[in-house]
Image (spheres, rainbow, N blue to C red):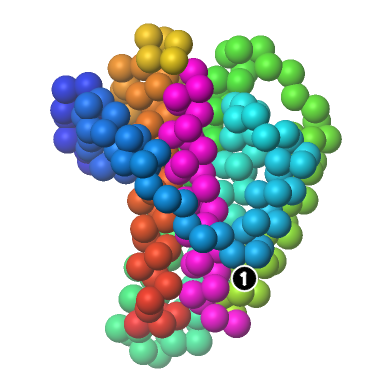
């Protein structure tokens, strides 16, 4: 549960966001992101980002970020599934099974966080009356997600660090894109944030403040994947 801080997320049910930053701290974290270099993306990540730009355009739109969030949940779903399978093979080794179960809970929490991002974007898109192509924004993202799921599983089976690296690339890209998008919309600094999901994800001073938090969440996912790259499949 997050602590209640001035300008930050409310402590009441605000477990959707990561951390308990104030608005000033989120502004500082945005600056840190914009002043930091992006990861050196691997070939698979570059293909993914290039394909998304080709289909949805390079401009940072709410609809494009909704597609990103649909895809963002996939690695965590794949790791959770692999972990469940692993548990069946070590069920007679209680300590190992427990550690794998803890990894399942971690993946699920990250997946849930990405789900909140998706719900918030869908709410904003609906509130602004943005019309989206069913083929481009419903059917195609499902196809991309299916392919990404298979790739994530395959990489994990071959070598877990490969799957974690791809996710770290994806989350790093999302972090920088969200923080950059905020700079492109100065009007968001004074636009109040109202949402039916505020009690779960948190209360924020403005729309800009919300997206800074989402960008920060993505950084935390990236750092978690980077730390997992250095570990064996299950310890």
Residue 126 lies, with reference to residue 29, above or below; the image says above
Q: Quadrant of residue 104?
A: bottom left
Can residue 224 be seen by looking at this rendering?
yes
Dominant SS of magenta comes to: helix
- Identified at 54% across, 73% down, the residue is 162
Using the image as rendered, state which of residue 226 and residue 117 is in the foreground. 226
Instruction: Pick whichever, 26 or 131, lies toward us.
Output: 26
Residue at the extreme right of the image, as rendered: 135
Q: Position of residue 125 (x, y in %)?
A: 61, 21
Local packing at callout 1 (Cα closer than 10 Å; few below 14, some 14-19, many 20+) is many
Q: Is residue 78 visible?
A: no
Quarter occupied by the C terminus: bottom left
The quadrant the N terminus occupies is top left
Residue 6 shown left or right of residue 162 in the figure: left
Q: Which residue is mark 1?
A: 153
Query: Would you say 20 lies left or right of 106 here?
Result: left
Q: Residue at x 68, y 53 (%)?
A: 48
Q: Reply yes or no: does residue 178 show up in magenta.
A: yes
In x, y percent, where is residue 207? 42, 19
Depth check, front residue: 188 or 141: 188
Q: Horizontal and vertical percent for residue 74?
A: 59, 55
Magenta residue span: 158-185
């Amino acid at each position: 549960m997050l602590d209640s801080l001035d300008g930050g997320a409310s402590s009441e049910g605000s477990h959707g966001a990561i951390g308990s930053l104030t608005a000033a701290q989120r502004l500082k974290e945005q600056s840190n992101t914009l002043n930091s270099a992006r990861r050196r993306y691997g070939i698979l990540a570059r293909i993914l980002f290039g394909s998304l730009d080709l289909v949805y355009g390079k401009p940072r739109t709410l609809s494009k970020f909704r597609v990103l969030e649909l895809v963002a949940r996939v690695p965590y779903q794949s790791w959770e599934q692999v972990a469940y399978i692993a548990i069946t093979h070590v069920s007679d080794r209680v300590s190992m099974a427990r550690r794998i179960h803890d990894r399942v809970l971690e993946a699920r929490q990250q997946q849930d966080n990405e789900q909140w991002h998706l719900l918030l974007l869908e709410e904003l898109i609906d509130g602004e009356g943005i019309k989206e192509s069913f083929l481009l924004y419903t059917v195609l993202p499902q196809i991309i997600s299916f392919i990404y799921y298979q790739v994530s599983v395959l990489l994990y089976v071959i070598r877990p660090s490969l799957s974690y690296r791809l996710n770290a690339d994806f989350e790093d890209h999302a972090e920088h894109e969200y923080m950059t998008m905020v700079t492109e919309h100065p009007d968001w600094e004074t636009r109040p944030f109202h949402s039916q999901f505020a009690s779960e994800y948190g209360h924020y001073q403005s729309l800009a403040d919300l997206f800074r938090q989402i960008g920060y969440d993505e950084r935390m996912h990236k750092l978690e994947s980077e730390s997992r790259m250095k570990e064996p499949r299950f310890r």
